[in-house]
Image (tube, grey):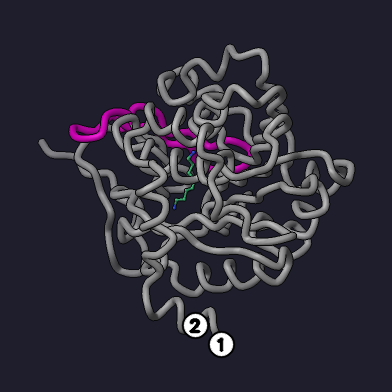
Amino acid sequence: MTNWIDEDLNGVRYGLEGTVVIDEQSPFQRITVIESKRYGKGLLLDGCWMTAEKQERHYHECLVHPALCSASEITKVLVIGGGDGGTARECLRHKGIKHLDMVEIDRRVVELSKMHLPDIGGHAWNDPRLHLHITNGIHWAKNASTNTYNVVIVDGSDPAGPAEGLFNKTFFENCKRILRPGGIFATQSESPEAFKSIHIDTVRLIREVFGYADPLYGWVPMYPSGWWSWTFASVEEASYLNLKENRAKDIAKHCEIWSPRWQKGAFDAIPAFIERELKK
Ligand code: SPD
């Protein structure tokens, strides 16, 4: 018998054929781990696709490397969310990182990811540079000292449930405050098709807070519409557009999707309807 596991959104289903391995309620959200025919094991939170073994690089590489290849320094980095470990794994490919704080609200996401999706976090879980804190990332950003991090990366889920506060002005202002000069902020910024207004509002707000912000467009086939975005921001100038050549060259060797050429096209691939909206 064929089993389908679907994310339902506004009258559309985004599904994979497979079986449910774990389905439990944590204090924060419903956590589901599945085994799919096409993409291997996958993770859903509150019924929304987060990641899958054979597709996660589409997402994690594009969130991490534009920021880490363009910040002036990358000694100290903060990741908020990202409990499956994929963002930390991509960050820690960068030898220049000395200290990575990863702040995840839900201990069970980390535990179940380590147990069922161990390759997504991979070596990151044992890397001494990784400092995992199970606590609220919004409070972390509020309480961190000014000028602490070279890069702040937000790998949250959609703006409902525990991730809702990762999309508001106060949170973005705190992220800006804790960035060091020359620092870069990065966040997943939803789909320009399936979450059009959230996407536009998010880019606008980040631009208003930081001064410079641009969305980058790519594909995560399992997410609603498959068409996804990540937004990068900085304060003094649009420094996320300028890659540090040596850093980028080293990292690109290991990537499946991301490369300097891909990134150039992905910033330029802003759809006309979004560009018009952002100019208003
Ligand atoms: N609609 C899905 C948005 C998910 C963003 N975060 C995914 C977590 C992967 N580390």
**Amino acid type for the residue under numbered disc 2:** Glu
| Residue 31 as seen in the image, left or right of residue 131 | left
Residue at 56 percent of width and 27 percent of height: 94
Are circles 2 and 1 on residues that touch, CB within 8 Å?
yes
Asked where in the image residue 29 lies, by quadrant, the reply is top right
Vertical position of residue 230 compared to residue 71: above or below:
below
Residue at 35 percent of width and 52 percent of height: 223
Return the x and y of residue 125 as percentages of the image width and height. 56, 17
Circle number at residue 29: none
Return the x and y of residue 271 as percentages of the image width and height. 37, 72
Is the C-beta of the residue carrying label 2 under 8 Å from the nearest atom of ligand 1?
no
Q: CA distance from mark 2 to mark 1?
A: 5 Å
Quadrant for the N terminus in the image: top left
Task: For label 2, count other residues whose C-alpha is less than 10 Å away and answer few (under 14), some (14-19) or many (20+).
Answer: few
Q: Which residue was labeled with disc 1?
A: 280
Say what secondary structure mark 2 lies in: helix
Say what secondary structure mark 1 lies in: loop
Foreground residue among 91 and 159: 91
| Residue 242 as seen in the image, left or right of residue 183 | left
Vertical position of residue 195 compared to residue 186: above or below:
below
**Amino acid type for the residue under numbered disc 1:** Lys
- Tell whether position 191 is magenta: no
Asked where in the image residue 170 lies, by quadrant, the reply is bottom right
Quadrant for the C terminus in the image: bottom right
Q: Which residue was labeled with disc 2?
A: 277
In the image, the segment drawn in magenta is: 20-41
Residue at 58 percent of width and 73 percent of height: 201
